[in-house]
Image (spheres, rainbow, N blue to C red):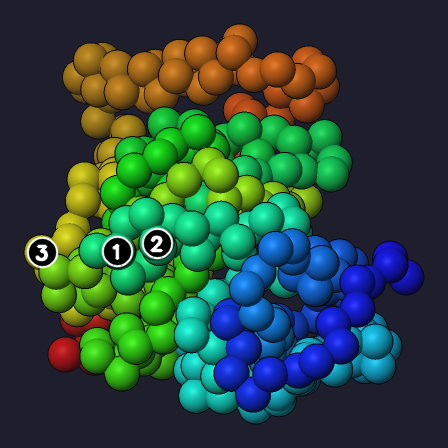
């Protein structure tokens, strides 16, 4: 087990509460928690709350070992096994002045929380800070996914997906909030199994509060390592996006609709046999992927995956989005 720095005196009022929703993260949970335990230079203690969705892959046993070495680590059962329910459970248990939402699939620089608090002090008008996400993959496929998830064609103009971006943004990937935000604007929407963070941050910014992100707040997110897992991830993003957008109609962006439009276009491709110019968008799409292929600093065998990764992202999201619209219509 990696070495964990010791914290001797537990304060009833920690400076930061870190909340980690997780389920079956055996390959990542130890590194993730250890990177949080080893945060440096904070003016107080860290409280870590892992809200576990009844993991059955050995994750729970790893957490028990970590608890024996770090008394400020608390594990709560997430009986509903959904992310927003887990987040709300953690927030209700939080004692920190700041509340940080982190993922079990990531690791964090040792000054992540220190630099986040510095940003809060530098920009007192902010209620949420964080860092743009840095995506990494462990396999050839995963390395190509990481490129796609940080590219304009992959994620549009989502500022929090570009590692070098600094400034105000719609949201932060692993946000640090002033705790009073939750009593002022409410908790996460538990009806949104996915995209609950989008809806929450939309509610936050609509109330006049601001989000600021900086590359000084560093983390690494390990992307999905297989096509099926990537498809499932983006399918559910698409499925719950219409519900989220329905709650915050004023926050709809073109990038939210592009995969949906792309799917409609693909379904209409037979028209190209009568109108050859109808092929033009798909030609431009292939050229855009080719441009990313040429720019990617990867071995050729990794870069070739881009020609299936971009379609997986867009088609899975688009299918989910269409089904999400149908579900929204049915429910209303």
Per the rendering, the mark at residue 121 is 2
Which residue is outermost to the right?
1
Percent across and percent down for residue 60 are 77, 79
Q: Are marks 2 and 1 in contact (CB under 8 Å)?
A: yes
In this picture, is 143 found above or below 187?
above
Residue at the (26%, 43%) spot, across then down: 168
Residue at the (74%, 82%) spot, across then down: 71
Percent across and percent down for residue 254 are 18, 40
One can see residue 250 in this view: yes
Residue at the (63%, 46%) spot, across then down: 109
For label 3, the residue is 250
In this picture, is 133 found above or below 130?
above
Q: Of callouts 3 and 2, which one flags the residue occurring earlier in the amino acid sequence?
A: 2
Residue 329 relative to residue 227: left or right = left
Per the rendering, the mark at residue 124 is 1
Distance CA(mark 3)–CA(mark 2): 30 Å
In this picture, is 47 found above or below 303?
below
């Amino acid at each position: 087990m990696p070495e964990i720095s010791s914290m001797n005196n537990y304060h009833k009022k920690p400076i930061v509460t870190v909340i980690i929703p997780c389920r079956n993260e055996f390959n990542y949970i130890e590194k993730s928690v250890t990177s949080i335990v080893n945060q440096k230079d904070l003016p107080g203690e860290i409280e870590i709350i892992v809200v576990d969705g009844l993991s059955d892959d050995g994750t729970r046993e790893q957490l028990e070992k970590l608890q024996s070495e770090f008394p400020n680590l608390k594990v709560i059962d997430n009986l509903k096994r959904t992310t927003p329910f887990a987040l709300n459970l953690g927030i209700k248990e939080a004692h920190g002045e700041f509340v940080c939402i982190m993922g079990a699939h990531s690791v964090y620089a040792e000054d992540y929380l220190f630099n986040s608090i510095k940003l809060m002090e530098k920009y007192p008008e902010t209620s949420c800070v964080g860092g743009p996400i840095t995506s990494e993959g462990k396999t050839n496929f995963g390395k190509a996914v990481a490129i796609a998830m940080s590219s304009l064609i992959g994620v549009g103009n989502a500022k929090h997906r570009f590692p070098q971006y600094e400034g105000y943004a719609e949201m932060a990937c692993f946000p640090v909030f002033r705790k009073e935000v939750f009593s002022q604007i409410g908790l996460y929407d538990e009806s949104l199994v996915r995209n609950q963070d989008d809806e929450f941050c939309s509610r936050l910014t609509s109330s006049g509060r601001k989000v600021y992100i900086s590359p000084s707040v560093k983390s690494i997110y390990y992307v999905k390592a297989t096509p099926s897992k990537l498809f499932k991830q983006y399918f559910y993003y698409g499925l719950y996006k219409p519900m989220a957008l329905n709650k915050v109609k004023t926050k709809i962006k073109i990038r939210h609709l592009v995969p949906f439009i792309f799917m409609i276009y693909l379904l209409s491709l037979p028209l190209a046999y009568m109108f050859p110019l109808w092929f033009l968008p798909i030609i431009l799409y292939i050229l855009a992927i080719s441009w990313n292929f040429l720019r990617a600093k990867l071995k050729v065998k990794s870069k070739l995956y881009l020609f299936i990764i971009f379609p997986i992202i867009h088609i899975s999201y688009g299918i989910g989005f269409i089904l999400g619209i149908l579900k929204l219509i049915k429910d209303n």
